[in-house]
Image: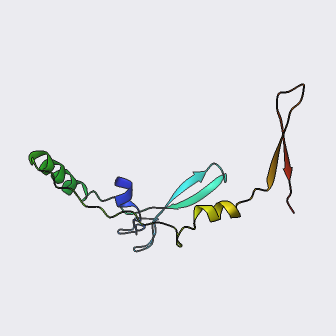
Amino acid sequence: MDHNHNVGRPQAVVQQPRKGSSVKGELQYKKSYSKIQKQWVLKPVYEKKKYDYISPMMAGVVKRKQDAMVEAIEQAPAPNIAPVPAPAKEDMVAKHSSRFEVFIVHSRYRRVCVYFSCYCN
């Protein structure tokens, strides 16, 4: 919940410049050493987190605990993320093809040998 509420915070700006720092109103960054790049990199500093969602949530928990009757919170179903409707499963199975054919060959030394044949272009 903390992540969902605080995601998308704007980058912090300098409010009171200190000696040797950025000027007022500039975006804030912190220096960090990257082990992968083996050099120093700048990472953005974001505004402080806000916790104003906790008080109403706790009040709701206490209210539901005190009340004998619990009101159901109506939730809308999550929208489908696909931009187009799904085709019929039979059509999808008919169009599906694999690049590989699997041949199972029995050998007297091994129980099953599997060979892959690729008919790629």
Q: What is the total number of numbered labels drawn onto the structure image?
A: 0
Residue closest to the far right: 108
Query: Among all residues in the image, which is located at the extreme top?
Result: 109
Q: Position of residue 50 (x, y in %)?
A: 30, 59
In the rendered structure, the answer to whether residue 36 lies left or right of residue 14 reads right
Q: How is the image coloured?
A: rainbow
Residue sticking out furthest to the left = 67
Residue at x 15% of width, y 49% of height: 64
Q: Nearer the viewer, residue 26 or 19?
A: 26
Q: Quadrant of residue 95?
A: bottom right
Q: Position of residue 107 (x, y in %)?
A: 89, 30
Please tell me which residue lies in front, 119 or 23. 119
Report the residue at 67% width, 51% height from top. Answer: 38
Q: Is residue 21 left or right of residue 90?
A: left
Q: What residue appears at the point 79 percent right and 56 percent down from the top-left corner?
A: 99
Q: Judge by depth and name the residue closer to the eye, 59 or 74.
A: 74
Between residue 9 and residue 14, name the one nearer to us: 9
| Residue 36 on image: x %, y % | 66, 50
Q: Which quadrant is the C terminus positioned in?
A: bottom right
Q: Residue 88: x percent and y percent?
A: 57, 65
- In the rendered structure, the answer to whether residue 59 lies left or right of residue 4 reads left
Q: Is residue 38 above or below residue 19?
A: above
Using the rendered view, name the quadrant where residue 4 is placed: bottom left
